[in-house]
């Protein structure tokens, strides 16, 4: 028994030491959206957007700063994700004229034809009308919950680019929490002229 405790303690100390020197990378705090000028702690990241025609288009995460952003990480075969997606569409439609945007990030593999077909069907069934791209390891590392790989994951950023909320799953209580976070951030954001 003594030997087991000693081994557990040594393993814990090794992991702690490795984390301190950066060999085992664990984000120390919630990450902000990247800044366009490259300053700040978060590197800029490119999201390859899904296109049913195959005409790939990219968006830089730094280009989302200045808006209140909801990042929705989902999987096209997840029934729970399919249930929550129309509610995200509703939030997008309700607030987009006030400086709010959504970017969906599919965990599907963009090089897999079956995954792409599933994603296309998911987008059609849920009537998603906001940009959807593919989740990368870099984005997962910087923004997804490091302790829970479940989907959906909802991350809300203020117009200043700071992460204000991260939720894993989707219940009525979480939906209310997300909506309140969006409304609070929009109230703090600079006034925007409605687009036509």
Image (spheres, grey):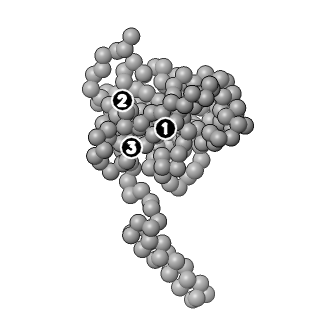
Q: Residue at x 67, y 24 (%)?
A: 125
Res. 69 mark: none
Which residue carries the number 1 mark? 47
Instruction: Please report contact status of discs 2 and 3: CB closer than 8 Å, yes or no.
Output: no
10 Å neighbourhood of mark 2: few (<14), some, or many (≥20)? many
Q: Mark 3 points at which residue?
A: 44
Across and down, in percent, residue 98 comes to 37, 21
Asked if residue 192 lies left or right of residue 10, the reply is left
Instruction: Check disc 1: other Cα within 10 Å, few if <14, some if 14-19, many if 20+.
Output: many
Q: Name the residue under label 2.
A: 67
Residue 181 falls left or right of residue 3 = left
Under tag 1, what secondary structure?
strand
Residue at image point 55% right, 52% down: 148
Q: Compare residues 22 and 5 and report the one nearer the observer.
A: 22
- The label nearer to you, 1 versus 2, is 1
From this viewpoint, is residue 86 visible?
no
Q: Which residue is drawn at 37% across and 33% down?
A: 63
Q: Where is residue 46 in the image (x, y as percent from the top left)?
A: 45, 40
Furthest residue in direction right, as rendered: 114
């Amino acid at each position: 028994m003594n030997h087991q405790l000693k081994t557990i303690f040594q393993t814990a100390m090794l992991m702690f030491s490795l984390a301190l020197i950066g060999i085992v990378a664990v984000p120390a705090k919630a990450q902000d959206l990247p800044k366009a000028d490259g300053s700040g702690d978060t590197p800029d990241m490119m999201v390859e957007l899904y296109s049913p025609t195959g005409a790939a288009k990219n968006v830089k995460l730094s280009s989302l700063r200045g808006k209140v952003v909801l990042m929705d990480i989902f999987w096209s075969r997840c029934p729970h994700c399919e249930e929550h997606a129309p509610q995200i569409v509703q939030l997008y439609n309700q607030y987009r004229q006030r400086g709010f945007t959504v970017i969906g990030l599919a965990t599907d593999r963009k090089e897999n034809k079956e995954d792409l077909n599933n994603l296309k069907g998911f987008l059609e069934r849920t009537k998603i009308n906001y940009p959807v791209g593919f989740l990368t390891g870099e984005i997962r590392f910087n923004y997804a919950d490091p302790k829970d790989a479940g989907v959906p994951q909802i991350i809300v950023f203020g117009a200043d680019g700071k992460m204000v909320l991260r939720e894993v799953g989707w219940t009525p209580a979480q939906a209310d929490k997300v909506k309140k976070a969006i409304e609070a951030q929009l109230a703090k954001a600079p006034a925007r002229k409605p687009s036509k």
